[in-house]
Image: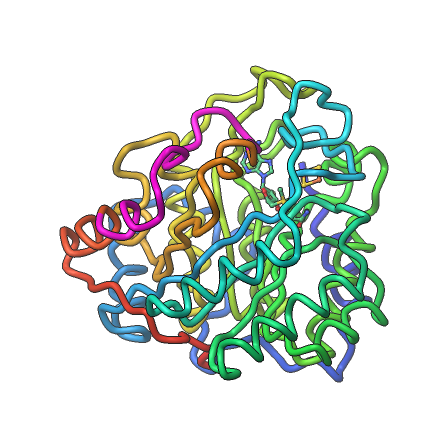
Amino acid sequence: MIDTDKADKIITANTSSELPPNASSSAAQYTQDELVRIFHEDPERLKSLADECCRREHGSSVYVRGLIEYSNFCSMDCTYCGIRKSNAGAARYRMTPDEIIAAAVRAFGEGYRTFVLQGGEDPFFTDDVLATIVTNIKKQCRYEPAITLSAGVRSYQSYRRLKEAGADRYLLRFETSDPDLYAKLKNGESLSRRLDALRSIKALGFETGSGFMTGLPGESDETLCSNALLTQKIGCDMVGIGPFIPHPDTPLAGTAKPDLERTLRAVALVRMLLPRAHMPATTAAGSIDNMGREKMLSAGANVVMPNIGAVEYKNKYLLYPGKICLDEEYHECESCLAGRIASIGKKIDYSIGSSLR
Ligand code: SAM
Ligand code: FES
C-alpha cells in the first residue's frame, strides 16, 4: 500500500513556492480517502461528470498533436518497457535529425500545429542535437507550431538549453506515485529524482506534462488515487494516463491483465481535479479495446496523438504488444480518428491547443 505521507513529502520537498499552484482555478480538492470512495461509488456517474467538465472547459474540440517517435534506443532498463536496454529482441532504429525535421515540416504543411518528439533515453540525442532539431523545426515552420519534448530525465541545464532553443512543452510521466513501487520498476531509481526533474521543467516555464500507468503490478486503489492527486499537486498542464500492458520480453511479462475501466476512472478523477488540463486518449487504451480512445474521450480526455512518423519506424517503437496503427500511414489514421471523434459528438481540432493556465 502506498505511503502517502512519503509521496506527499517528496512532492512538497520538490515543489517550491516559485512554482505556480495547480493549473485550474476551479479544481476540486479531495483527500485520498474521498477519491477512493468516488473511484468505487458510481463509476458511470463519475465518467459522465468528467465528460461534462471536459466539455465545459474545452468545448467539443479534440486537439491533435503529431507524434514523432524518434528513437527506440534507451540507456534505461525499466522493467515494464518493451524498448528497455536489456531487450535484445527489440529491433533498434534512430531517426536522423534531418528525418525528424522533415517529418514535422511536412505535417506542418498539412495543418499540424503541435509536435511531440518522444524517444528512449538515447545518448545520441545530446542537448546540442535536440536543440538543433527544435530550432530548425521552429524556423522552417515560421515559429508557429508548439514543440513538445519527451526525452526523459535530464539536468536543469539541459532543460534550460532546450527551452532556449524553442521547446514549449515537456512530457515526463512520473509513472506511479508510490516511491517503493517506482524504485522496483526502475531498478532502484528514485521517484524524487523524477519529481525533481518535473520541478525543473516547471520552473523553466515549459507547459508541463506528466502522468502515470494504471494497473502496474503492486498498484492499489490508494496508489491510483494518489497518482491522480499528484498530477494536481504538480499542477500539470497535460496529463497522460494509459493502461500498463505487459510486454512478453520484459521481467513483467504476463503480470497483469490490462483493465481499461481502471484507466477510464483514473482519467475521470484527474479531469475532476484538473478541469483545464489537456489529456490524451492514449494509444495504449486503443490497443486493448477497439473503442478505447472513444471511451477515454467520453470520460474526460480531449487530445489525440497520431503518429506522423514513417511506417518503417512506427512498428519498431514497441513499448507493449498489440499496439495499433502500426501499418497505417498517418493520413489513414487521421481520417479514422476524425470519424471516431465525430461518433461521440466531438470534433477534431488542429489548432495549437496551448495550456489554458
Ligand atoms: N524515455 C521517455 C520517458 O521515460 O519519459 C519517454 C519514452 S517512454 C517509452 C513513454 C511512456 O511509455 C512511459 O512514460 C510509460 O508510461 C509508457 N510505457 C512504457 N512501457 C509501457 C507498457 N508496457 N505499457 C503501457 N505503457 C508503457
Ligand atoms: Fe527507456 Fe522505456 S526503458 S523508454
Residue 317 seen in the current view: yes
| Residue at 33% across, 48% down | 296
Q: How many marks?
A: 0
Classify residue 91 as left or right of residue 271.
right
Is 332 magenta? The answer is yes
**Quadrant of res 57:** bottom left
Q: Position of residue 75 (x, y in %)?
A: 80, 39
Q: Residue at x 24, y 55 (%)?
A: 48
Closest to the observer: 222 or 354? 354
Decide if residue 13 is on the left or right side of residue 88: right
Query: On the picture, is 260 further left or further right than 87?
Result: left
Q: Which residues are magenta?
A: 318-335
Horizontally, is 72 left or right of 156 in the view? left
Q: Position of residue 11 (x, y in %)?
A: 74, 63
Of the pair 264 and 186, the residue shown nearer to us: 186
Identify the colour scheme used: rainbow
Quarter of the image where the N terminus is located: top right
Residue 240 coordinates in the image, percent (x, y): 50, 53
Question: Which residue is found at the position 51% from the left and 65% from the top?
Answer: 238
Q: Quadrant of residue 187?
A: top right
Q: Position of residue 155 (x, y in %)?
A: 85, 64
Residue at 61% of width from left, 79% of height from top?
A: 21
Dominant secondary structure of the residues highlighted in magenta in the image: loop
Q: Is residue 42 visible?
A: no
Residue 190 to residue 128: above or below: above
Tell me the quadrant of ligand 2.
Answer: top right
Q: Is 54 placed above or below 210 here?
A: below
